[in-house]
Image (cartoon, rainbow, N blue to C red):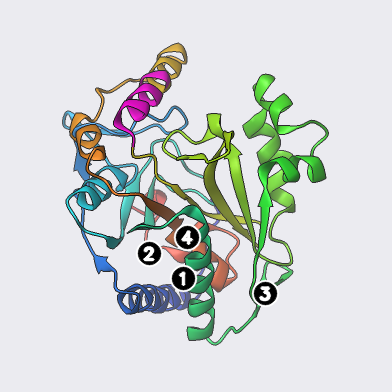
Amino acid sequence: MPSFSREIIRANLMQRAEILQLIRGFFHDQGFLEVETPIRIPAPLPEAHIEVIPSDGWVLQPSPEICMKRLLAAGYTKIFRIGKCFRKAERGRRHLPEMSILEWYAAGQTYADLTGCCEELIRHIARGLGVGDILSYQGLTVNLSAPWQRLTVADAYRHFASISAEESLAQGRFDEIMGLKIEPNLGKSRPVFLVDYPAEKASLARLKPGDPTVAERFELYIGGLELCNGFSELIDPAEQRRRFEAEQDRMRAAGKPVYSLPEKFLAALAYMPPCAGNALGVDRLVMLFCNAAAIDEVVAFTPERL
């Protein structure tokens, strides 16, 4: 990875600190409680596309989702967390194996509510930094004025791909086409929420009422950056167990390590209210507002600097 001057990194770290203060102020004003969750957990959620990092018989959390949802089940209705998460073999211009994630959950909300909250949060940060509605990022001029576009996955395939989403799933090419054909075209001039993912691509999300072929999941793209992943939460323990077991089967077939199911999490689902949650990459958000091409520019230490 390229190296960057101390002056650039110092300026970006100062901006990063300001962004974190703006995030906390936004959620405190919205009545959210900031919580901390353990970094080490006994077992992760089974997700075939994420490789976890072992830690003395447990794992380093790839997400605070397990513990935060258990807090929802215990009666905490609006919570957020900013902290470290860990994923093995993730290193690149936009990836670090140790990343900072903002995650928040609200009882009684859906993914539609979350897209609105996410839009308000990022516009709040832009105003706080003096950016306003026009953001410049890596040669792009992005208009942040509301409302932001909502684009279904099916429509994105129709606009940017040569086959349908259903055909890409049948051919095992969904992620490939998303990464090569669709994502590079999203958020170049205005932020875009990509919504209504195929049910097969949302193992923890609620299926959409009236259309069980899609899940109430979204991702946000600004300036070519994927920033977050949110959804209306699945709260049916039996259905969640079935999906987890199917995911474990896929992991075994791929030769990946398979951990025991998070039984305390599954038990807590029976008490969890209807809710929605979102995970937003803090490092990438800072990249966006610092006009940084690489994640190395917005963190104090990368693995190579240690």
The reply to whether residue 197 is visible in this rendering is yes
C-alpha gap between disc 2 and disc 1:
7 Å
Circle 3 residue: 136
Q: Is residue 187 left or right of residue 101?
A: right
**First in sequence: mark 2 or mark 4?**
4
Circle 2 residue: 300
Amino acid type, mark 2: Ala
Residue 242 placed where, x, y %?
37, 22
Badge count? 4
Q: Residue at x 53, y 61 (%)?
A: 115
248 to 284, vertically: above or below: above
Amino acid type, mark 1: Ile
Residue 9's label in the rendered image is 1
Labels 3 and 4 touching (C-beta < 8 A):
no
C-alpha gap between disc 3 and disc 1:
19 Å
Residue 30 placed where, x, y %?
35, 75
Labels 3 and 1 touching (C-beta < 8 A):
no
Residue 40 placed where, x, y %?
20, 42
Q: Residue at x 74, y 67 (%)?
A: 189
Where on the picture, by quarter, is residue 170?
top right
How would you rate the neighbour count of disc 1 (Cα within 10 Å): few for under 14, some for 14-19, many for 20 or more?
some
- Determine whether the residue tagged by mark 2 lies in a helix, strand or loop: loop
Q: Is residue 71 left or right of residue 158?
A: left
Q: Is residue 140 left or right of residue 106?
A: right
The reply to whether residue 3 is visible in this rendering is no
Kindly report which numbered mark, 3 or 1, lies closer to the viewer in this rendering.
3
Circle 4 residue: 114
Q: Which residues are magenta?
A: 236-246
Question: 171 or 6: which is nearer to us?
Answer: 171
C-alpha gap between disc 3 and disc 2:
23 Å
